[in-house]
Amino acid sequence: MAPVCDAFVGTRVSIERALVCSGAGQFPVLVRDARGLAIALRSGGGHYGLDGTLATTFSDDGGATWSAPIDALPRGADVRNPAFGVARDGRWLLAYWRAGQRCYPGGAWKLPVTERCDPDAFVIASGDRGTTWSEPVAIATARLAWASPYGRIVHAPDGALLMAAYGPSLGATPGAFDAIVLRSRDDGATWDDESLVLAGASELALCFATPELLVGAVRRAAGDVAIVHSPDVGRSWSTPIAATRVDEHPADLCMVGDALVMTFGRRVRPLGCGAKTSRDSGASWSDREVVLAGDGIGNDVGYPSTVQLAGGSLATAIYFARGSGVDGWGELSCQLLRYDCELVAP
């Protein structure tokens, strides 16, 4: 029997793009604050490298223009993998993994052993949109040997803040990760309450589909994204449901009316960012799949982060590490896509 392959039937449309920054921008996390938009992203290093740190930038015009990124932390410790959000009092919260603390034996990147050691995940806060930051506060987990924060920090209906993280359980094989949720009940000061989401998984996006239902989009070890549901603010989780093909990862989730929109990285051609919609909180997905950006050069692309703007349209931040179809923006850039929600959730 002949193989069955996917086909594409669609209409070409144009959407707006804006340059967030050039020469930096991996792993962007996009949030809305009281004044506009803000992004945390990687700066000063490649995908790996001790010179890498995290920076923040903001936009007060809906993402058309962006402030110059300001490093949030010193370089030299491979500060990476941001989780970013806005506390209830308006402060920015930035969590990160300080990989240089134990990932460079002999000077070259290597995943660390999975034994207990000093915490290497931290959280800082800023009340002036990234100009200054508080002293780092360590995040320790009882379940994992080390923990990398990830994605957008979300507000739970019960007043807690929820943050995703991943890492290996104690004694696990290096590279075998579990995804967890951390909670804060003091507006981001401490994160000492955790729950397992899925073993054999890593990068996790969180979104409340309803006040009673928390949805997660989690990257599995096979390289796809699965959907999981929690009816109790992340304490327990359902069996995962496959949502993307292999090499379509990681994903982000955003509610648009009664529709759950998932944007996800495409590391298969066309390289960039895809989107699809669910009307049943991720239990199933429409056959209509949108390629928001497909002009990546090389598969180090994606990591979309999506929010709905005040006017109703959507904005998605993504990065390209090997160039895109936009001339003059350099090989490495963070870009913002702006488009009508009807494009993905008609």
Image (spheres, rainbow, N blue to C red):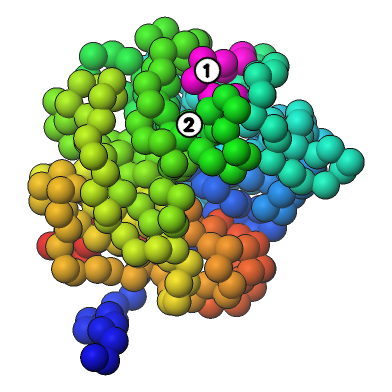
Name the residue located 22 percent from the left edge and 81 percent from the top edge.
10
Q: Which residues are magenta?
A: 137-149
Q: CA distance from mark 1 to mark 2?
A: 10 Å
Q: Amino acid at mark 1?
A: Thr
Name the outermost residue toward the top. Answer: 186
Residue 247, given in percent of the width and then of the height, sits at: 44, 63
Q: Main secondary structure of the magenta part?
A: loop
| The image quarter in which residue 286 lies | bottom left
Is residue 27 left or right of 266 when viewed as pictured?
right
Name the residue located 31 percent from the left edge and 49 percent from the top edge.
226
Q: Quadrant of the N terminus?
A: bottom left
Residue 289, given in percent of the width and then of the height, sits at: 24, 68
Depth check: 342 or 234 in front? 234
Depth check: 66 or 296 in front? 296
Name the residue located 37 percent from the left edge and 35 percent from the top edge.
198
Is residue 241 left or right of 291 when viewed as pictured?
left
Name the outermost residue toward the bottom. Answer: 2
Q: Earlier in the sequence, mark 1 or mark 2?
A: 1
Does residue 162 lie above or below 316 as drawn?
above
Q: Is residue 206 visible?
A: yes
Q: Residues within 10 Å of mark 2 (few under 14, many from 20)?
A: many
Helix, strand or loop under label 2: strand
* Disc 2 target residue: 165
Q: Is residue 141 magenta?
A: yes
* Disc 1 target residue: 141
Q: Amino acid at mark 2?
A: Ala
